[in-house]
Image (cartoon, helix red, strand yellow):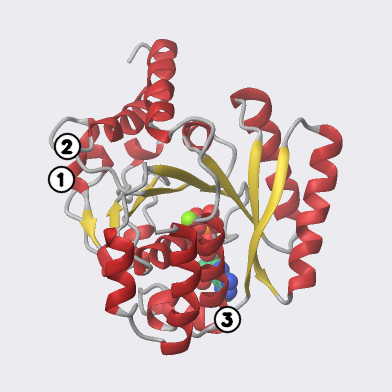
Amino acid sequence: MNQAWGLNRIFPLLAAHQDQVHPDQAAGLRERPRRRCRTITVAGGKGGVGKSTVTVNLGMALSMAGREVMLLDADMGMANLDVLLGLTPSRHIGHLLDGSCGLEDLLLPGPHGLKVIPAGSGARRLAQLGNGEHAAVIRAFDELVHPPEYLLVDTAAGVSDNVALFAAAADDVILVVCDEPASMTDAYALIKVLSRDFGVRRYHVLANMVRHAGEARQLYTKLARVSDRFLDVTLDFVGMVPHDEQLRQAIRRQSAVVDTAPGSRSAQGFKQLAGAVDTWGEPERPSHDRIAFFGGQAALATGW
Ligand SMILES: Nc1ncnc2c1ncn2[C@@H]1O[C@H](COP(=O)(O)OP(=O)(O)OP(=O)(O)O)[C@@H](O)[C@H]1O
Ligand SMILES: [Mg+2]
């Protein structure tokens, strides 16, 4: 079965019925051969542009369409994903790093089969992890017995090594921007650092909290124009999510808007984003190799 066709077919159905995927449709997706794990890092530079919201809702939209999805909260020490989904973790990345549990033990089950790896909250040590520790987290994925089809990584604000290492380890980077001057300048600063120091050349731009499609396109064009001119990178426009009060209500209820208000404007944007992501061609290097490769490089550099 053509997977992209499957998703595109299902999303209008989801919107129309505002409940669950038709069982036959979901079964159709589950029966098709499982794809290799694809890792997507969600970044943005500026704080509060919607990185965590995008990670949760993109993951949930893919999951509701029958994909196997795992979310990694890489905003270490400031965990958000478990809170956004109303989950209560008993362990976090810190326990993985001190050897008291394995990656599989951290997997928190969320709605619709989504799995979340929590970052831990309020532990200063977690916010100060070194490159070797980040590499150890990334390398732990090589040992997953049953890798998901999608691994989405939510990152912190800023241009720290933490963000850069997870962006460099992924197959794709989604860059979330919104209509604020600081979002544009911070996104540009992030692209500059990632491309110059970490060799990340390709970015998928998502315009969040926009009023209309024209505004979203304008944001993308502005960023692409300046990046094309000064940096050796490729940007494409991957979609838009409108500013939506229903999304805020969903957040207050600790749920994903695509799940609890699938007919809302923002949910439509997330479903279209998921449909677009699912049509991406195979990455240049399979993510599994890429993560292993990355882990190896980081280990050499840091002595881990
Ligand atoms: N499309 C939207 N419509 C309305 N509100 C939104 C939308 N997207 C995000 N928000 C709001 O913006 C706030 C910040 O979102 P979120 O926590 O996802 O940002 P972030 O980039 O992950 O922030 P941080 O850098 O602190 O991790 C949230 O309170 C959320 O309610
Ligand atoms: Mg966040």
Quick check: marks 2 and 1 in contact, CB under 8 Å?
A: yes
Q: Which mark is residue 295?
A: none
Q: Which mark is residue 265?
A: 3
Which residue is more in the foreground, 64 or 226?
64
In the rendered structure, which amino acid carries the disc numbered 1? Asp
Mark 3 surroundings within 10 Å by alpha-carbon count, few (fewer than 14), some (14 through 19), many (20 or more): some
In the rendered structure, which amino acid carries the disc numbered 3? Arg
In the rendered structure, which amino acid carries the disc numbered 2? Gly
Secondary structure found at label 1:
helix
Classify residue 98 by image quadrant. Answer: top left
Name the residue carrying label 1.
105
Which residue is more in the foreground, 35 or 239?
35
Rendered location of residue 13, percent (x, y): 45, 81
Classify residue 6 by image quadrant. Answer: bottom left
Name the residue carrying label 2.
102
Secondary structure found at label 3:
helix
Rendered location of residue 19, percent (x, y): 35, 85
Marks 3 and 2, how far apart at CA = 39 Å
Among numbered discs 3 and 2, the one appearing first in the sequence: 2
Judge whether 173 appears above or below 240 on screen.
above
Which residue is more in the foreground, 73 or 90?
73
